[in-house]
Every structure is written in structure tokens, then in C-alpha cells.
Amino acid sequence: MRIRPFSVPLVAPLSTARGEISQRRGFLVGIGGGGEDNDASKAEPTVQGIGEATPLPGWTEPYGRCRKELEAFAAASGDAASAVDPPEAPAARHGVALARLDRDARTANASLAERLSNRHGTGAAPADTVPVNATVGDGSPAETAASCREAVDVGFDCLKVKVGNRALSGDLERLRAVRDAVGEAVTLRADANGAWSRGTAERAIEQFGAFGVDYVEQPLPADDLEGHAHLRSRGVGIALDESLAVRGDGETSPLDRVRRAIEAEAADVVVLKPMALGGPDLTVEAATAAREAGVEPVITTTIDAVVARTAAVHVAAAIPDVSACGLATGGLLAEDLAPDPAPAEGGRIRVPDGPGIADGAFDGLCDGTDGG
Ligand SMILES: O=C(O)CCC(=O)C1=CC=C[C@@H](O)[C@@H]1C(=O)O
Ligand SMILES: [Mg+2]
């Protein structure tokens, strides 16, 4: 198994209520033979698999813990990386689980989405394309409206706007400017990243309805499930994001956190981040459980590099008739690790045919041949 650290800058810092994201640092994970359908006894690994572990404070373990967990796993597992349980911390587990899924899907000549649907989802044939929303950070009313107008002009019909980073009056001005700029037909979502008190959240939801906001993501702090349940059925949907993150400190499993949110009737929508839940496999399982409970799953990246971002597209494709997902984040990066095999076009992303994540698109990035 090989680990390759990377760092990719954003074009401009993404300003959110939790602060700014200006770069993404993580690790590529490369593995060789072994696995369910691979013969690890062969001298040369028959098929490579690649994964990505890109930690994000607030959603996963910190960078240093991710590195330590990957290094410990590499020391214990060797190249086959099949006989050892994956790391527990979510981003580290995501890196290993994705590499294994990529390798096993490529060996079976199946796309990652097919593998995920058959092994972790409904078994339905995956979609060929998935709907995606544009992601717009905090800014002045004019800046926010202009970014939203530009997104609609290139084909997005669903916009997610960051809120909670200024007084509510300022966010109301921004949403009014957005609605004036894009018209009534475009779906509008807001993401407060847990910034509001219950009082502020109630006032926000009362007024967001006038702008036709479809749902507000994480209006309250992560642990306030009761408060989120209390905000529902007021004309604007409630989505949970940070409340579902495991954060890798030995808490409950990702599926348990999703189930707990559903049992608390705290969400109309669950925002599922494969990096935060510990892997594409666990995310499809969580999405399937949410659907069975009548809660809509939305898949988003954690502003990842191209390997994890493309894998997240396969996760969304494995969820039948999925709502618009937060996967069009490649454009937020100033640099990436490889050309994008799944660019956003017209508000949708075409799912790579595979096999695996994107067939040989990432070969050489972390297989030890070019020092990658
Ligand atoms: O959901 C999207 O449109 C893209 C992903 C996204 O918005 C986020 C990814 C990671 C951290 C946050 O800044 C943000 C979120 O809170 O959902
Ligand atoms: Mg969010």
C-alpha cells in the first residue's frame, strides 16, 4: 500500500459560517493485489486501486490523526490491504475503503456505482448522470447574486448559498438579491453550518419561506437534534450535515448517527459526505436507510480532490432518483491531481463508465511507478 500526501489550493477561499476553506490537504492511497476477486499470491498485483483521504475539521479527524492512521494501516497490511480492518477515523477509512472498492470493481470489470448499488444499496442499475447544485459562498448581496446568476447561465437549476456568517438581515438581503437575479424557477438552498441559535433559526426560517428556500442545511449546532426537529414543518425543509459527521473520536458509527437523526425526526434531508461517514460503502448504506425512513439523502463532497469527488458521483448514481447533490466542487479548486473525468455540465454530472472509479484515469497517481 502506498500513501501520497497532497495539497490543492482553492481558486478563492470558500467563506462559510465556520470560517474559510482555502486549501485541501489529504492523502492518496494506492493498493495492489489481494481483495475478494484478486489473487494476492501473484508476484505482481494484478489490479491497482486508488483512494483519497482528505480530512476536514468539523467533519472528520484532523490531518495528523489521518496520517497516523494511514501509516499504521500500511504498516500492518502491506500491499494487499485486504486482510486488515480499515482505519476507524472517517477520512482515513474513506481512503482505504475507496481504494479497495476501486480495485475490486476494476477486477470485476464493474463501475464503482454498480459495485456500490449491488453490495451496499438497492441493487438498482445506477444512473448515467446525476443532478448537481452550484455552491456559493458568503459574500455581499451583489457578489452572491452575480455568482448565482453565473451558475444559472451555465445550466445549474439548483443553488446552495452559504448563510450564517453575518447578521440575519444581511443574509435576507443576499437571498432577496439572488431571487431577483435568478427568478422563481431555480431551486434555492441555504447552508448555515450550525451558526444560529434556536431563536435566530426560527426567525430565519419564517422569512426564508418568502424566497422559496427549499431547505436550510444545519441551522443549529450539530448536537441539537431536538432543536432541528422543532424547526421542521414550517414551510422550509431542514437538512442535517455536521450532525451526521462521525469526526473519528470513537463515537457511534455513521449509520447509527443517521438512524439517531431519523429517530429524532430532526431532518427532512440528510446531507451525506462520504469522507465524513468513512467511505462510499457506508454512505450508500446510510442513504438507503434514510430513504426507507422517508428522509431524502443528498450526497456532497468535502471539497475533495478529483479521486474522492469522482467516487462521490458514483455514490450519488447508486441512489435511485437522487436529488441535486453537492458534487460540482471541482471548479472551486485552482489545481487538481488529474483531469476531471466527471465535470459538471448543464447542472448534471455524467457518471464515468469505469471500471472502478474512472478506469485508468488515475493510474500512476499513487501506484509507486512514478513515485506517485
Ligand atoms: O454541498 C455542496 O454544495 C458542496 C459541499 C459543501 O458545501 C461543503 C463541503 C464541506 C464543508 C462545507 O464548507 C460545505 C458544507 O457544509 O456542506
Ligand atoms: Mg453543509
Image: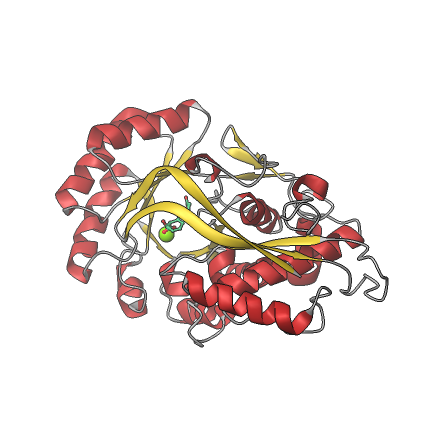
Horizontal side of 321 relative to 270 (left or right) equals right
* Point 26% across, 66% down: residue: 227
Q: How many marks?
A: 0
**Residue 58 makes an appearance in the image:** yes
Is residue 310 positioned above or below 234 on the image? above
Where is residue 216 shown, x and y percent of the image? Answer: 31, 50
Question: Which quadrant is the N terminus positioned in?
Answer: bottom right
Where is residue 138 shown, x and y percent of the image? Answer: 26, 40
* Point 27% across, 29% down: residue: 145
Please identify the residue farthest to the front as the structure is shown: 371
Is residue 297 positioned above or below 329 on the image? below
Q: Nearer the viewer, residue 317 or 278?
A: 278
Where is residue 210 shown, x and y percent of the image? Answer: 23, 39
Is residue 44 positioned above or below 145 on the image? below
Horizontal side of 29 relative to 188 (left or right) equals right
Is residue 313 positioned above or below 281 on the image? above
Where is residue 129 shown, x and y percent of the image? Answer: 60, 38
Please identify the residue farthest to the top as the structure is shown: 153
Q: Nearer the viewer, residue 253 or 8?
A: 8
Quarter of image, res 147: top left
* Point 73% across, 65% down: residue: 80
* Point 61% across, 62% down: residue: 96
State the colouring used for the structure image: secondary structure
**Residue 60 makes an appearance in the image:** no
Horizontal side of 116 relative to 265 (left or right) equals right
Q: Nearer the viewer, residue 12 or 209?
A: 12
Quarter of image, res 246: bottom left
